[in-house]
Amino acid sequence: MNANRRALAGYGAILLVGGAAPFLFPNFMFQLAVLWIFILFALTWDTLGGQMGYNSLGNIVFFGAGMYISAIVQIGLYYDVGEYTAHYGAIKVDFTPEQYFTGLALGIGAAAVGCVIFAIVFGRIVFGLRGPYFAIGTLGVALAAGELVGTWEWVGAGGGIALPVYPGEPDARAQLFYYLSFVSAVLTFAFLKWLYSQRFGLAINAIRDDEEKAEGMGIHTLRYKTIGWSVAAFFLGISGALFGNMIGFVEPLEVAFPTVTFGIFMVVMVLLGGKGTLWGPVLGATLFHVIKETTWTYMLGWQWVALGALIIVNIVYFQQGILGWAQGKWPERFGIIVDEHRSAEQETR
Amino acid sequence: MASISSHMNGLIECQGVTKAFGGVVANNDITLNVPKGRITGLIGPNGSGKTTLFNSIVGYHPLDAGSIKFQGKEISRLRVTHIARMGLLRTFQQTRIYSKMNCVENMLISVPHRHETYRTMFSKYPPEVTERAEELLDYVGLYQKRFLISGDLSFGQQKLLEFAMALMNEPEVLLLDEPTAGINPTLINGLIDRLKRANEEMGVTLFVIEHNMRVIMNLAEHIYCLANGKLLADGRPEQIQKDHRVIDAYLGGRA
């Protein structure tokens, strides 16, 4: 009861700070929005990488796909996309507030649904791979996606595509995207918390620990894997749509499919916080973002070296991440206990 | 080999099962029956093809020739998960459990997946399932350790957990690959007793590979002996014990 109340207070505090942040730190609104998106990245990466034991290096593909799907929907609702990208700057494009918000809402929805469809199709192909082959296979998909979109004239090829301009004040725009990022990260967390507490959670953990055994016990492994991957894709699609609109301009290699930055950050954040746990990714993403912003500000020129050092220390000394280490140190806090009762009957007596 | 008795209506019926890996014929024209409700043994020297036969039955690889029927249905072309859901389950020689999950979780996820629907995938376990899990953990003596991470248990305890997981799955037939290997000798009697009770009280048909002769003679009602991939002999334990072909195969026979 007490623990429950404490947990509730903790959640309340986080929601309160998250909700008030734009007013408390108005100058950092963009950074804070990115923090929520990073938390979403880490949470969704952990669904496969931590809970299911499938280390994907290609999750970024859903981020980019979501971004492009949203852009196409937002523009395509009112203009011809091919013409818009071909004549960029030459034809007049205007979006009324109503058009803008309708497009944004539909774009985000389409990004989420579209990415789930991608996930189901890709899943059929990549889930034939195990271990390091899965990692490399998914990395290949992400790299190929960036290159392919880069040659696709209809969506602007390597030149990219500009998103509709927000019809209002810059501050209001920043707030809107901050809150959308905040809400999506919170929803991702809440959904995954629920999902892991159902049979689904145990099934993907079983796949992680011994997939051959899981098959031998009759678990519908492919079905569970595809759903896990689709859940990650759904939320990553949303994050892509938001991030694209936040930046205002989508370009294939740096913004939409940044495999070696965001794509790797996802993994690092989870490893830092502790994979296979619910709070590890949140903790890891927050810590990572703070370290990243600090080094990018105060150690400019050395920021990648600092990041590399962090990864090495993490991998060599802290393989289990922060929460994994805590669980090893205080197992009883995590419910890993010997029950003194001799047997089931004795306890009920 | 006319002496090979064919029980009518085996729960598992293997007919001329042949499987080769490259030039090595691991199973050569094996015909045998596992009758419903009984305990059947499978013995043979190392490398005689026992585990290969188990793998063939549960669908780990396609057969080169022959047929395998379960409850009268041909299963030799079905996949592992499908066969498992029909109620034909195996345990592994090298014990396999979900090592980062605790014992209760290992048990819960081992429920039968025959009737799994999208609704049950996204729901919690009803309390009676958790009760059943704890009851079975109690049955194998792991109740007190049920919240410990299963990978931290001793090898023997992991083996007991794997057995409990198999029972949780409510199989029709359980294929046990060396259930007593690596278990403390004093615990072996307890395990034999539990296997017999699972057979009698829960009605699980058992098909057991075992190297420990004392165990298999105690346990099985009918024993098949393989050697060099072929079926060498079969019969009641006391017949097998006296069979000179079996003795030769084990002791490196005289010419």
Image (spheres, helix red, strand yellow):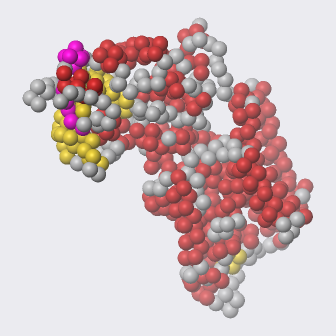
* Foreground pick, A41 / A162: A41
Identify the magenta region: B229-242
Relative horizontal placement of residue B227, taking residue B185 as reference (left or right): left
At which x and y percent is residue A260? 67, 66
**Could you tell me which residue is drawn at 45 percent across and 45 percent down?**
A221
* Foreground pick, A121 / A242: A121
Which of the 4 quarters of the picture holds residue B114?
top left
Return the residue found at the far bottom. A90
Relative horizontal placement of residue B65, taking residue A266 as reference (left or right): left
**Could you tell me which residue is drawn at 37 percent across and 30 percent down?**
B177
At which x and y percent is residue A34? 76, 61
**Could you tell me which residue is drawn at 65 percent across and 83 percent down?**
A159
Which of the 4 quarters of the picture holds residue A86?
bottom right
Return the residue found at the far front. B255
The quarter of the rendered structure image containing the C terminus of chain B is top left
Relative horizontal placement of residue B80, taking residue B156 as reference (left or right): left
At which x and y percent is residue A100? 69, 72
